Image (spheres, rainbow, N blue to C red):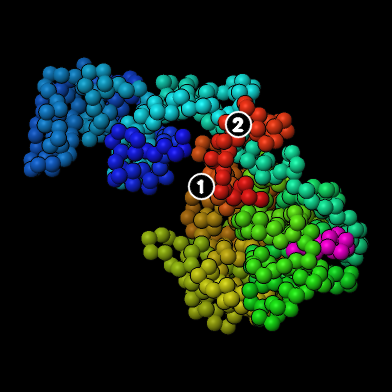
Amino acid sequence: MRSKSVTLLKGVGPKKAQSLEKLGIRTLEDLVRTYPRSYEDRRSPKAVSSLTDGEKALVRARVLLVTKGRGFGRNRTLRILAEDSSGRLEVLFFHAAYLDKAFRSGNEYFFFGKVKNENGRITMFQPDFGGGADGAEGILPVYSLSKGVSQKDMRSYMAQALELLKDQPEPLPASVIEKRGLAPLSRALGSIHFPENESAYKIARYRLIYEEFFCLRSALLLSKDRFGQGREGRSVVSGGSVRFVSALPYELTSAQKRCLDEILKDMAGTRAMNRLLQGDVGSGKTAVAAAALAEAAGAGLQAAFMAPTEILARQHFENLSRWFGPLGIRTDILIGSLTASERKKALERIASGETDVVVGTHAVISEGVVFHDLALVITDEQHRFGVNQRKKLNQKGENPDVLVMTATPIPRTLAVVLYGDLDVSVIDELPPGRIPIKTLSYTEQSRREAYRLMLDELKKGRQAYIVAPYIEDPDSREGRSAEGLYAEFRKEHPDISCGLVHGLLKQSEKDEVMEAFKRGDISVLIATVVIEVGIDVPNASVMIIEDSERFGLAQLHQLRGRVGRGGYLSYCLLILGEAQEIARQRAEILCGSSDGFYIAEKDLDMRGPGELFGFRQHGLPQLSLADPARHLEVARRAGEDAAELLAADPGLEKPEDKAFGKLLREKFTGADVLTL
């Protein structure tokens, strides 16, 4: 089915095929899975006198007069006066030479289009039309288009494709179809494109939403290798984590202990660990990860810790070296800025087993890095890594345990959908004694008050961040830029040292500025969101976010987490460039709560999961109709059914499951989601 080209369709030649390809449509399957973005109800005509300005409506009217306008050839206009029993309607067509013989006075026609009603004078511009009963066409789909393809084209192609594919086999197992009362695929596809009524549409939509979740959950479960032979690992038990935790100058929170117990239980098992550790900023994920590293090192095995940037890798290396040194755990670092000599010596120590824990960036997975006996892989801020990168690191050992960490709070209700390939541990408790960050909001008119507060903190010897939504001053948008704020601040405060960081700088330049800020050589760091995942600067007590309405709630919370890391009161100051209601709501939520999971739930409500998480960066396929936030119950049912199916038939080899296995291979082969 997926190999049948759209060129099989009547009316699709090479040029049309190119236009369709711009929409991601190459095959008949691509076409029928391109769902309408909306619908036009053309079942019942409305009376002309009831039409309102701006609405789209279907009218049945008798033509009174046809007038050809000025112009030559194709550019000539056509004006029609028509009426029904309630009133008169003027219809205007542009470039209408092809319509010279389309209308005859005295005949009735259906017109469908946008209405303009000016003081009772009702006009339709360029409407669709039909004679006899052809105009009342039911509920018609409206598609996203590319140049060269019209709605009429798409509807024609879709009808043809549905006819050609009407006998395609049902891919979902019969047991699932029966259990959930799902419509057959061919009927669902027909009704999602050309629904007879609202009921048929809802039945079709439910079937297709369920199918998306069922396929996704099945693929994730298969990638997780929970069933059948599984991904065999090794049992790692040493007591190294106990020695590490005992040496800490503080006690772990109950949430940290619970998560560490879950991780150690996985490591002790014979099936390789594949776990996500999520926790809010400052919840103590690094200490839990370090305990897991110590457990592996205590067993005489190696572990790797990968961070998204060199500066974060160095920070982790410094912390781990300080913690591990007294315990006799040997730590090394692998980053791109090492000299050839430093890199060579580090590689030799890693290959010989002299190094217990390797900290680094993506350099850790580059060619030439050979581990003596890699047993544990940890990646920090996993959303900055594609799953293919994690796979490369995974392949450096023989099925090592894998732990991925993120400080991006994910609503508990969504974690299972977004990370179905991973077990999930959540640190949902902050260490005691942390001073809450005071979050305040300001309007554009009162922004100087925020800066006065920042200057007061600088006088105390503190440091501050100022974040802007843009790098350069935007031409057609309102909003401040990092470069503009940098120039403005230097002019107004020449006596205060400040630095500039944004995404167009080279990584070495960014690292140099951020290191200077960390040392205290720079008092104010002006930046874009590149500092969202940044260094630990306990002396920074102020975060000013300009045009805060241009950031999502979860992102604002992440930025806020850059401060409040010392033992004194810190501030997050939101400056609203536009007094929009949604901006005020976000500011109110952030000012009233420091719970990242609560904030993530609110962000999800306001923005939706696709925008909030960006499925593609997680290695997940795009969901066309399914929305994990709105259809969570459907996702839960589909997940249960997928687990039940794969428990009974891990290889999808039973005759009744083979069609579904084929669908998964077609849908996910080559996709990151199946490469873990």
Of residue 234 and residue 261, the one placed in the foreground of this image is 234
Q: Is residue 299 magenta?
A: yes
639 left or right of 443 in image: right
* Residue at the (51%, 36%) spot, across then down: 625
> Which of label 1 and label 2 is nearer to you?
2
Which amino acid type is shown beneath numbered disc 2? Lys
Report, in whole angstroms, how far the alpha carbon at label 1 lies from the one at label 2.
52 Å
**What residue appears at the point 15 percent right and 32 percent down from the top-left corner?**
99
Residue, disc 2: 658
Q: Which residue is at the front of the view, 27 or 108?
A: 27
**Badge 2 element:** helix
Q: Name the side, left or right, on which 315 lies relative to 480.
A: right
Q: Which residues are magenta?
A: 293-304
The amino acid beneath tag 1 is Glu
Residue 77 in view (yes/no):
yes
Q: Which residue is mark 1?
A: 581
Point 54% across, 82% down: residue? 494
Quadrant assignment, res 153: top left
Q: Position of residue 449 (x, y in %)?
A: 57, 66
Query: Measured along the vertical axis of the image, is residue 113 above or below residue 533?
Result: above
The outermost residue toward the top is 85
Left or right of 513 in this view: 429:
right
Q: Residue 356 magenta-drawn? A: no
Q: Are marks 1 and 2 in contact (CB under 8 Å)?
A: no
Residue 336 found in image quarter: bottom right
